[in-house]
Amino acid sequence: MKALDELTFDNRFARLGDAFSTHVLPEPLDAPRLVVASEAAMALLDLDPAVAQTPVFAELFGGHKLWAEAEPRAMVYSGHQFGGYTPQLGDGRGLLLGEVYNEAGEHWDLHLKGAGMTPYSRMGDGRAVLRSSIREFLASEALHALGIPSSRALCVIGSDTPVWREKQERGAMLLRMAHSHIRFGHFEYFYYTKKPEQQALLAEHVLNLHYPECREQPEPYLAMFREIVERNAELIAKWQAYGFCHGVMNTDNMSILGITFDFGPFAFLDDFDAHFICNHSDHEGRYSFSNQVPIGQWNLSALAQALTPFISVDALKEALGLYLPLYQANYLDLMRRRLGLTTAEDDDQHLVERLLKLMQNSGVDYTLFFRRLGDESAALAVTRLRDDFVDLAGFDAWAEQYKARVARDGDYDEEQRRARMHAVNPLYILRNYLAQNAIAAAESGDYSEVRRLHEVLSRPFEEQAGMEQYAQRPPDWGKHLEISCSS
Ligand code: AMP
Ligand code: MG
């Protein structure tokens, strides 16, 4: 276990030089204080959890202090936002403080979000508000606990610093961690600004540090792109299987590592709704829940375009062709498990589609349906769940098909079925209204609800005593919350 001043830095991205990022110091927050910290994330840095309670923790992650070895940098990138190309973006309100490596030899970027203005702030103030920092914190750690690859969150620091959005709010900082903060948009930036030397350096950097096994392949860059395609297909399959809506799948928010990254107005589905749009600025539904699948491919094509200096167009196209079949295979595999099936049959896709259509038409709670389906035998579970559906004849037909399918699947006992299904079907997810309740309390200075919710969501598959209120369907007001982009 380490103290805060014992972290070891190795700032590999900063060493790429000024064409890639700009040195900027964090702008401190007034009266910084700990809102919440993740012990699990602290463990990734070998940090003793007790250090979160020390004043220096809030000073470091509230922008007042800096390690001597840190080299805070704002990265430059660009990207396609809602389908249109924006030539220059970059860290407008976040800084890569440095890269820390832990005792296991892993590197972790420390990125301080909300750290003030940078050369890439455009019209923004460089700040993040408490509400959006809490949302990203909770989601990062909840996604990880669900087994969905994501950037991580070490802590949120609150403050007295006023920040103007639709109304006056308080500034906060989020310490985000990832093995890399390189986005698709980094490659697009150097491609569209016609800087082949820097682009080659970037490609070499990502290959060496993040895809070293691809070096052994005859065409290392192609192998790397293929791996990126595969990771995205797997990631988006998990989002779809667990009802996660990212909200802003612009190419500048897509990680080169294939992890969930830079999500703004994200949401987990309450009622199943394939057309759900969580970002209320997304008027056309470009990033609606079901569109995430084709948008994943669209984004990979944008990256492929930026990689044309290194890989032939034919090879890129072939690699892109892997996306959809891989997505489908991964998705179906996850959904089979969610249904408690251990074998594969050709018609399973159809079984899943029919169920989702029924859920859609009846507004059935996506998370609780699967959890309850595993509570007891298939026959008993469908009898109990039937009440949630409006189209009873439709549900009965599906239930017959499902029971027959379960019978063909194998002769397992009920206890086994429950354990297997509960291990993949969470009881607790980050519902918008739960986040909202925690945020409302935090905005009035009470952080206990954020901490409790974080705690509950860190073990989403395990029933926790006294936490029934986190495993309910949302109240009516909680289903129609509009989450703005102004974070
Ligand atoms: P995001 O929607 O958070 O992915 O941000 C898109 C772009 O806008 C990035 O370049 C951000 O750095 C920048 N940005 C967002 N909010 C702010 C802000 N409050 N101040 C400065 N830049 C911002
Ligand atoms: Mg972004």
Image (cartoon, rainbow, N blue to C red):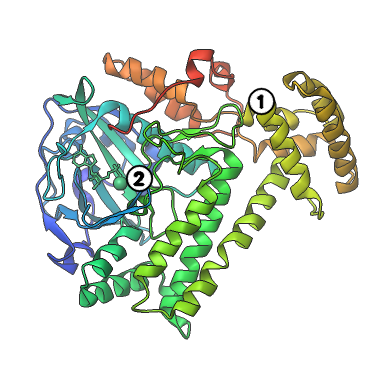
As drawn, 268 above or below 287: above
The residue located at (18%, 47%) in the rendering is: 5
Q: CA distance from mark 2 to mark 1?
A: 29 Å
How packed mark 1 is, by other alpha carbons closer than 10 Å (few <14, some 14-19, many 20 or more), is many
Which badge, 2 or 1, is on the more N-terminal residue? 2
Task: Inspect the image, locate mark 1, and give the three-letter code of the amino acid beneath it.
Answer: Val
Could you say which quadrant of the image residue 53 lies in?
top left
Residue lying farthest front?
284
* Label 2 CB sits under 8 Å from any ligand 2 atom: yes
* Label 1 CB sits under 8 Å from any ligand 1 atom: no
Q: Which mark is residue 262?
A: 2
Between 187 and 424, the one lying in front of the other is 187
The answer to whether any part of residue 217 appears in the image is yes
As drawn, 83 above or below 117: below
Could you say which quadrant of the image residue 136 lies in?
top left
Report x, y in % for residue 4.
22, 44
Q: Which mark is residue 364?
A: 1
